[in-house]
Image (cartoon, helix red, strand yellow):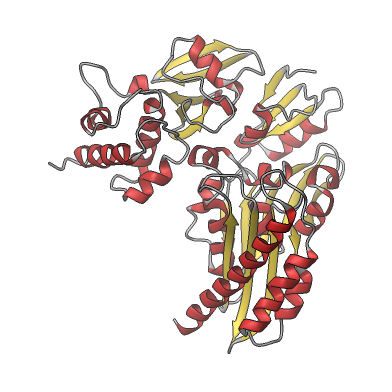
Amino acid sequence: MKIDVTINGSKRTLEVAADALLLDVLRANGLLSVKYGCREGTCGTCTVLVDGRATLACVTLAGQVHNRSVETVEVMGSVGQPHPLQRALVDAGAVQCGFCIPGMLLSSKALLSSNPKPTRAEIATALDGNLCRCTGYTKVIDGIERGAAVMRGEP
Amino acid sequence: MTIQAFAYPATVKEAVALLGDSSKHAIALGGGTAIAHGSRRGAELLVDVTRCCMDRIAVDYGKTILLGATARCAEIAAANALPNAEGALLREAAAGVATQPLRNAITLGGNIFHLAAWSDLPVALLALDAQVQIAHIQNGDFAIPMSALVAVHPQRALPTNALITGVSLGVGSKLRGSVYRRFRLTTTDYSLITVAALLEVEDRKCLHAAIAIGAVGPRPMRAAGAEKILVDGPLTPKRIADAAHQAADEVTIAPNYRLAADVRKRILEVEVRRAIEIAAERARLKATA
């Protein structure tokens, strides 16, 4: 079946199997930042934004995003021009193996779009679906807090 | 049979017609988290009902809370306009469901229809004596009490191809207090015990008590015996303790590899007692506010 979906700002028409997972469709279309982790909705490494909401691609069928917009971390910045949140996580020492980071970034992006000055508790809640085996989360929250301040234009 | 196609109806009427079309085995798709993992019941057609304008969260004349079936847990958790103890109970139940991305996906209707032992919203709705609104191609629109749905399981209580369209419940007196408690091993774990308590207290006397217990058995239950102990009497520590003990005795506790039934029963009594105490305190604070 065909679905019309806006991926990272570009309108696309994709041919997908009716029972295809969004995770598999995005990866088949080159968006490898969407990770194949647990594949059962618990680890958060497949987090994407659907219509601005943090969504687990491994428990979302591709057909559900017909006529919706999907964002992956590729839309957030580049090596040469990182997004303030990406810069902040690196500066905070929050990136070790890096596997959880795309999901963390997108969950944070979703949070800050509606709450530009979250408390640490609100950041932790927004990221409660993104597991990290490396860092213990403190530096991730430090980084998001700092990145949010930069996004607000604070020094 | 594997899924062959999706349909995207724009209205409830279209959705009901698609679900009732006997030429295809169709099921409703809300947030999709249950269906993505395989609970597809042999469906050929998925009817995406998230585009049928069933996502409202509203209060009618200050007296009735109306929630659409595709309202997401995250939206309910953030609905500060939902009034009184009833609104607070719904928010508290919704705010702790799973994790943020799952709260963004899980719908009210899906959480009811795919009732699992650990489902949260049905427990709160049971305590709130909610009515569940149904649309069906042959039976038309009707309502069924939450208690009737969970007595057997929504999928057995409802006619084939019925569509849950929403929930309604009454807003009670401002003298009510409520709480939703969970016992689980981490903040995002499946709950091992849940308790929803709603109390109306005036001059230390309990006028109304609703205690719903979930996660200990396959379906949520009201602790009617415990409620009877509390109502029309003073809320003394002994009465509360007796009610908690009664609740732990009267509900069916299923064996579970994560928590033995006898241990779960003891923790349940503690959780019910705490729930009554907190709901009563919240009611007291409102009365003195």
Q: Nearer the viewer, residue A6 or B76?
A: B76
Quarter of image, res A20: top right
| B18 to A11, vertically: above or below | below
Q: Whole-percent x and y of residue A77? A: 28, 21
Q: Which residue: 53% across, 63% down?
A: B88
Q: Nearer the viewer, residue A61 or B277?
A: B277
Q: Is residue B255 visible?
A: yes
| A108 to A102, vertically: above or below | below
Q: Is residue B107 left or right of residue A34?
A: right
Q: Whole-percent x and y of residue A89? A: 27, 31
Number of marks in picture: 0
Q: Which residue: 80% across, 24% down?
A: B42
Instruction: Please identify the residue farthest to the bottom as the structure is shown.
Output: B203
Q: Nearer the viewer, residue A152 or B277?
A: B277
Q: Which residue: 70% across, 39% down?
A: B12
Q: Which residue: 75% across, 64% down?
A: B222
| B232 to A155, vertically: above or below | below
Q: Is residue A18 left or right of residue A73?
A: right
Q: Is residue B165 left or right of residue A40?
A: right
Quarter of image, res B203: bottom right
Q: Is residue B98 left or right of residue B140?
A: left
- The quadrant of the image that shows the C terminus of chain B is bottom left
Q: Is residue B130 visible?
A: no
Quarter of image, res B158: top right
Q: Whole-percent x and y of residue B237? A: 61, 82
Q: Nearer the viewer, residue B184 or B276?
A: B184
Q: Whole-percent x and y of residue B178? A: 58, 68
- The quadrant of the image that shows the N terminus of chain B is top right
